[in-house]
Amino acid sequence: MKILTLLGSTRKNGNSETLARKAVEGTDHTIVTLADLNIEAITDLRHTPEGFSPVDDDYEKLVTLMEEHDVLLFATPLYWYGMSGPMKDFFDRWSQYLRDDRFNLKEELKKKKAYVVITGGTSAKVKGLPLVQQFNYICEFVNMEFVDYIIGAGVKPGEILNDEASLLKAARWNEAFKEPL
């Protein structure tokens, strides 16, 4: 099982990254920090005669990585009760690449399993639930299986290590990720 972890935080070694790394430790995985890539915001041309134009950025590398992996693990801090900006830009570009004939992204996503890690303050376990629902709707739209989520409590770097329930769930995911498909 190959796991692609997409980190949405702009903070290095933050709580979302820490929890996601615990989940994939010792597995066949790739970790990408979206903020380290050049991902342009979408110019929505879906309903124009010319359609989308090619964009010279790093997004096509992500499309290839998504196609090559079995599991997509999305990790984001809870920013203003939603996903981070880099994660939102990542998903917005699906509007373009689900229509791009050079790739088979729409069909490939149907074969993937999605997991979500969200971290935020002490109330994140409740206030992060609408974001879980948003990820679920995204997965439904592309017919990708939404398997599970973790909402961890931690604001300052390292605080997630005090959230025993989230660490335990990440450890359970880790064991599951090590099992053959």
Image (cartoon, grey):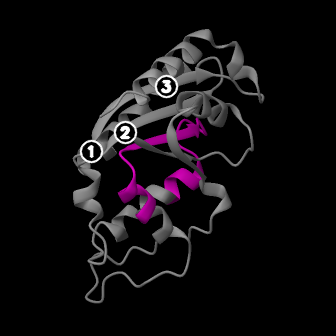
Q: What residue is disc 2 on? A: 114
Mark 2 lies on a secondary structure that is: strand
Tags 3 and 1 touching, CB below 8 Å? no
Horizontal relation, residue 8 to residue 129: left or right: right
Residue depth check, mark 3 versus mark 1: number of the one nearer the observer: 3
Please rate how many residues cluster around mark 3, counting C-alpha atoms within 10 Å: few if below 14, some from 14 to 19, many from 20: some
Residue 154 highlighted magenta (yes or no): no
Tag 3 secondary structure: helix
| Distance between mark 3 and mark 1 Cα atoms | 20 Å
> Could you tell me which quadrant the N terminus lies in?
top left
Residue with the mark numbered 1: 144
Position of 43 relative to 157 (above/below): below
Amino acid on which disc 3 is placed: Asn
Q: Do the residues labelled 1 and 2 touch (CB within 8 Å)?
A: yes
Q: For this rendering, which residue is in front, 63 or 157? A: 63
* Start-end of magenta stretch: 64-89
